Amino acid sequence: MTKLVVHVPHASIAIPDDIWPEFLIDPERANHEAMVSADLYTDLIAREAWPNVEIIEAQVSRIVVDVERYEDDALEEMSMVGRGVIYTHDHMQERIRKDPSFETRVDLLARYYTPHWSKLRAAAIGVTLIDLHTYPAEVWPIESDASGLRPEIDLGFTDGLTPKAWVLALTQHFSDAGYEVGHNTPYAGVIDAGARAAVMIEIRRDIVGVPGDCDKWQRLIRVLNALPLNG
Ligand SMILES: [Zn+2]
């Protein structure tokens, strides 16, 4: 079986001390936005479900720098709503932060984006990569297409990066466990980090439960732990 690496880009809620002056909202609201925007517990899910695999995690909240975005705003559709690689708006599309100066942008990318991608690309060589996320059950105002189905498990895949047979095996696995599975909806595709095979798993937040003895949590961990990985 190919080695597995798990990418966890959105679990952190950390806002470094020197970032605070950039926000136009009070710390309580900024912390709240970091919390709401985070794919909370995806770091714990990864560690519990796959205790022995390498996990590549972002070091800061996505509202500081979002490592899952394109570095170039011209390529990044979410930059249109103030949620490109450097967020200026919250999930309700209200402004929360100044437009970064050129120097700030270069500095933030050098500190958090470039090193993350160097690490991810190095880890991804020759392995099976799972890009792990959660997403809200309700549609957010920042979403450009609100019409997509929102299944309990959304498998995101891209031709050339994700073998079809693997998508079918994963779909079967989650369906057999009683989960509702969708393909590339509401979010589509998987990041290209140079892995041998890659898939995005987006878990709808209402089925995550809370870490510990919670039935939802235990069921999710069990099913992820037994995932067919022969991508
Ligand atoms: Zn995410």
Image: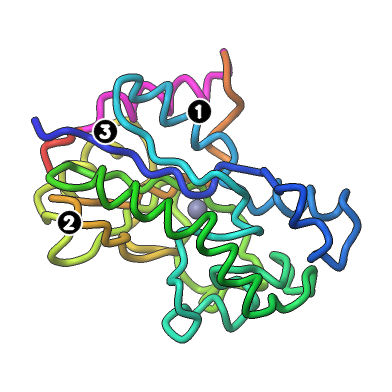
Judge the density around disc 3: few (<14), some (14-19), many (≥20) Cα neighbours within 10 Å.
few
Check disc 2 and report the residue beneath it: 162
- Residue reaching furthest to the bottom: 74
Which residue is located at x 17 percent, y 35 percent? 229
* Magenta span: 213-227
The amino acid pointed to by label 1 is Leu
Which residue is located at x 25 percent, y 31 percent? 227
The amino acid pointed to by label 3 is Asp
Instruction: Identify the element where label 2 is drawn.
Output: loop
Q: Which secondary structure dominates the residues rendered in magenta?
A: helix
Q: Pinpoint residue 1: horizontal percent, then vertical percent.
A: 8, 30
Judge the density around disc 1: few (<14), some (14-19), many (≥20) Cα neighbours within 10 Å.
some
Check disc 1 and report the residue beneath it: 44
Which residue is located at x 79 percent, y 48 percent? 31
Instruction: Give the number of the mark in front: 1 or 3.
Output: 1
Q: Which mark is residue 94?
A: none
Q: CA distance from mark 3 to mark 2?
A: 21 Å
The amino acid pointed to by label 2 is Thr
Mark 3 or mark 2, which has the lower sequence index?
2
Q: Pinpoint residue 138: horizontal percent, then vertical percent.
A: 63, 58
